[in-house]
Image (cartoon, rainbow, N blue to C red):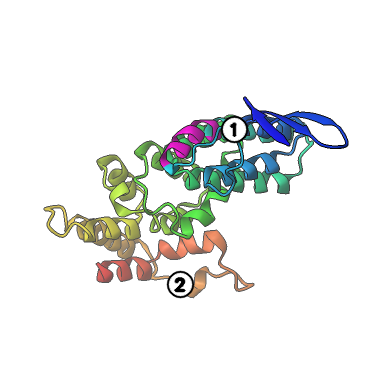
């Protein structure tokens, strides 16, 4: 005979009488955290959030109510998970590969929750404070290249942080290819356009302005690209693209940057637009 009274479970059998208590979802998750089983805690929370586990007594069955109940808790759990991994990494208890794995999990959870602002405002700042912003962006790249951020309106402040990070690492060429997988509407602000013009990021300029054909500024990129093209003709010795490739046949990031700075490349962009 089983009787459930206020989450307390009483079990009476021929062998004896047993007493137990049904745990709330958060109590169960915190027990896993106490055992430092963070992956188990995150996995359980994810299953509860998506309705794959409904056995806990305080989980709403209606999807909207369940999401409203669990999202604040999951965001709090993510914050704790970030702090735990970054602090333990400083103590050298966690290997670098484990930190990379946990960073991917954090990013994936944020996208799963559609919490893009949380990803940029909380997660990115946490990594930056610990001097790990390069790790954050490195792990974010595959998600962007797979168009998993395309549906979001990306905050201008975060885009500026992206430009700053990649410029410091001399990887603006890579960033340009990366941002072609961001919805061009997120790049429409005047501040972002000024950065594109200043850094001669022609592909992004073309992407933005070619999608605004009704705009009076439609021909601005042509004027900018042609001006750079003329300057290159005057100062350059018409070095061919293959001369930028090193003696081993490898271009690398620097090779790509130099190629994109060549007359041939700029001329192709001008014709393309």
Q: Main secondary structure of the magenta part?
A: helix
| Residue 235: image location, x then y, percent | 35, 61
Quadrant position of the C terminus in the picture: bottom left
Q: Quadrant of residue 181?
A: bottom left
Residue 197 falls left or right of residue 159: left
Label disc, if present, on residue 241 of the rendered structure: 2
Can residue 63 be seen at all in this image of the molecule? Answer: yes
Q: Which residues are magenta?
A: 64-74
Name the quarter where the N terminus is drawn.
top right
Q: Viewer-nearest of labels 2 and 1? A: 1
Q: Foreground: 5 or 264?
A: 5
**Callout 1: 10 Å neighbours few (<14), some, many (20+)?**
some
The x, y position of residue 100, in whole percent, is 66, 47
* Disc 1: which residue: 77
Q: Is residue 33 magenta?
A: no
Q: Is residue 70 magenta?
A: yes
Q: Nearer the viewer, residue 261 or 120?
A: 120
Who is closer to the viewer here, 18 or 203? 18
Query: Looking at the image, which residue is at 48% across and 60% down?
Result: 146
Q: Position of residue 248 (x, y in %)?
A: 64, 72
């Amino acid at each position: 005979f089983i009787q459930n009274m206020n989450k307390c479970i009483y079990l009476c059998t021929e062998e004896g009488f047993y007493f137990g208590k049904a745990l709330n979802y958060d109590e169960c998750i915190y027990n896993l955290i106490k055992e430092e089983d963070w992956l188990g805690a995150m996995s359980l929370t994810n299953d509860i959030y998506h309705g794959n586990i409904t056995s806990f007594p305080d989980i709403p069955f209606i999807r909207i109510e369940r999401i409203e109940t669990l999202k604040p808790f999951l965001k709090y759990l993510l914050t704790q998970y970030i702090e735990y991994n970054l602090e333990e990494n400083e103590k050298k208890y966690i290997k670098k590969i484990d930190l990379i794995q946990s960073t991917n999990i954090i990013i994936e959870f944020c996208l799963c929750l559609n919490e893009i602002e949380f990803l940029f405002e909380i997660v990115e700042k946490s990594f930056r404070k610990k001097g790990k912003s390069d790790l954050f962006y490195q792990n974010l790249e595959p998600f962007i290249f797979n168009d998993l951020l395309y549906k979001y309106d990306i905050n201008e402040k975060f885009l500026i942080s992206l430009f700053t990070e990649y410029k410091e690492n001399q990887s603006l060429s890579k960033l340009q290819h990366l941002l072609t997988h961001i919805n061009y509407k997120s790049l429409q602000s005047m501040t972002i356009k000024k950065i594109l013009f200043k850094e001669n990021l022609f592909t992004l300029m073309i992407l933005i302005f070619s999608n605004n054909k009704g705009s009076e500024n439609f021909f601005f990129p042509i004027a900018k690209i042609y001006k750079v093209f003329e300057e290159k003709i005057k100062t350059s010795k018409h070095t061919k693209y293959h001369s930028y490739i090193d003696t081993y046949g490898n271009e690398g990031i620097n090779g790509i940057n130099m190629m994109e700075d060549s007359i041939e490349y700029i001329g192709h962009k001008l014709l393309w637009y």
